Amino acid sequence: MARYTTAYSSFVSRLDEVEMLIRLAREKEKRSPVTLRKEINSLCRAAVVLLSSHLEGYVKDLGELALESLHSKQVPRTSLSSKLFYHISKGFFGDIQDTSDPEKMADRLFVFIGDDLHFWSRNGPFPQQVPVDRFNKGFSNPAFSKICAYIGRFGYSDYKVELARRLGAKNLPITNMIDHLVGTRNKIAHGDPMATEPPADVSTMVTTIRAYVETTDALFATWWKKNFCSIR
């Protein structure tokens, strides 16, 4: 059995482009930290944005891997969390909640019955692949609380506690770094010219986020295998 999931392997592979940007920024910093400051900052800002994007991508890839395994390995739905079913069809629930018109509510309910009713059963496995794009809807800008909430969609309610136990004294620095990364990324996206980090700090971000992803991957894969099936 592989040590990590394919989602983790893909994440590590995508880190290459982030590390390339950091190397370029460091080279320029050695040559002329003052005159090349704008170029250094631009490279570091790009690295931060990419790192945040790759973290988000990893979480979604892990979720997709888990959902695909339910169908491909014909896992019975008996013990699946009710939250998982909710997130499959939450778009319909939102539409129904947003209207008080009985006819519109009924029309949406008919669409739900036609499109999603076959997912809603505790008997046997899912008859077809769960629509990952719908399940993932609403997850973006991967702050730590959002990642915990996303993982909670699968019913893994002890994730945060088990992560803290596994990371020990590193837990708070690592989870704070996730929020710092996302916060910096958001400032960059909103045009804040002062939102940047020096190359050494961006490199520390990469190391820290990789350690977080590695730990999360191991915890989630172990929990998923224990409750449903293997995904690594």
Image: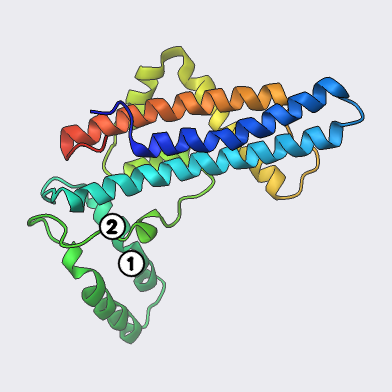
N-terminal-most mark, 2 or 1: 2
Q: Which residue is mark 2?
A: 86
The residue most toward the right is 35
Locate residue 205: give its quadrant.
Answer: top right
Locate residue 113: give its quadrant.
Answer: bottom left
Screen quadrant of the C terminus: top left
Q: Is residue 197 left or right of residue 68?
A: right
Can you give x and y, in whole percent of width and height, for residue 136 in the image?
39, 54
Which residue: 35% across, 38% down? Answer: 6
Which residue: 85% across, 22% down? Answer: 31
State how the image is colored. rainbow
Q: What's the amino acid at mark 2?
A: Tyr
| Element type where label 2 sits in the image | helix
Q: Which residue is mark 1?
A: 93
- Vertical order, 46 against 217 (above or below): below
Between the residue at mark 2 and the residue at mark 1, the CA separation in whole angstroms equals 8 Å
Can you give x and y, in whole percent of width and height, for residue 66 in the image?
28, 45
- Vertical order, 213 against 77 (above or below): above
Q: Please say whether residue 198 is visible from this viewpoint.
A: no
Screen quadrant of the N terminus: top left
For residue 47, the mark is: none
Which is more toward the observer, 226 or 98?
226
Q: Answer yes or no: do the residues labelled 2 and 1 have beta carbons within 8 Å?
A: yes
Can you give x and y, in whole percent of width and height, for residue 91 in the image?
37, 66
Callout 2: 10 Å neighbours few (<14), some, many (20+)?
some
Which is more toward the observer, 9 or 75?
9
